[in-house]
Amino acid sequence: MSKERWYHTWYRWFMAMTLRLDEQETEALRRRAELEGRSMQDVARQAVRDYVERTSKRELLDRVLDRELPRYAEALERLGQ
C-alpha cells in the first residue's frame, strides 16, 4: 500500500469529527456532564453509542418481524377474533 493511500485509509478511520450543537444543546450537554462528573465528550460519545445500539436492535427486530409475521398471519388473525 502506498504511503498516500495508507494515510487516506488511516484518516478515514481515525479522524475526529466536529459536532456542532446549538446553545441549548450545548448547555444541556454541559449540565448532564457536570451532574455525572464526566466530560462533555464522554457523555456525547456514550449517547452516540446508545443510539446506534438501540436503533440497530430495532432494525433487526423489524427485519425479523417482516420475515416471520406473514407465516403466522392467519393464526394471529384467528386469535384476534
Image: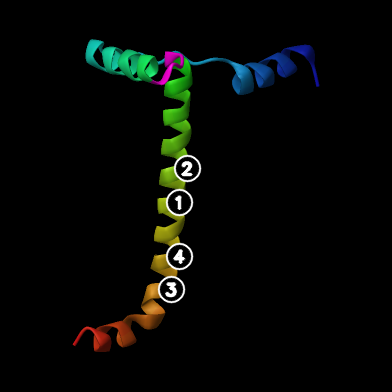
Q: Residue at x 45, y 38 (%)?
A: 52
Work out whether 31 lies above or below 74: above
Which residue is situated farthest in the left direction here? 81
Amino acid carrying mark 3 in the image: Glu
Whichever of labels 2 and 3 marks the residue nearer the N terminus, that label is 2
Real-space Cα separation, disc 4 to disc 1, in angstroms? 11 Å
Give the labeled residue for mark 4.
Answer: 64
Real-space Cα separation, disc 2 to disc 1, in angstroms? 6 Å
Magenta region, residue range: 36-40
Look at the numbered discs 2 and 4 and tell me whether their residues touch, using CB distance below 8 Å: no
Tell me how many marks there are.
4
Give the labeled residue for mark 1.
Answer: 57
Look at the numbered discs 2 and 1 and tell me whether their residues touch, using CB distance below 8 Å: yes
Q: Secondary structure at mark 1?
A: helix
Real-space Cα separation, disc 2 to disc 3, in angstroms? 22 Å
**Is the residue marked by circle 1 packed among few (<14), some (14-19), or many (20+) residues within 10 Å?**
few
Give the labeled residue for mark 2.
Answer: 53
Look at the numbered discs 4 and 3 and tell me whether their residues touch, using CB distance below 8 Å: yes
Amino acid carrying mark 4 in the image: Val
Amino acid carrying mark 1 in the image: Lys
Q: Position of residue 38 (x, y in %)?
A: 46, 17
Callout in the foreground (4, 1): 1
Amino acid carrying mark 2 in the image: Glu
Look at the numbered discs 1 and 3 and tell me whether their residues touch, using CB distance below 8 Å: no
Where, quadrant-wise, is the N terminus in this rendering? top right
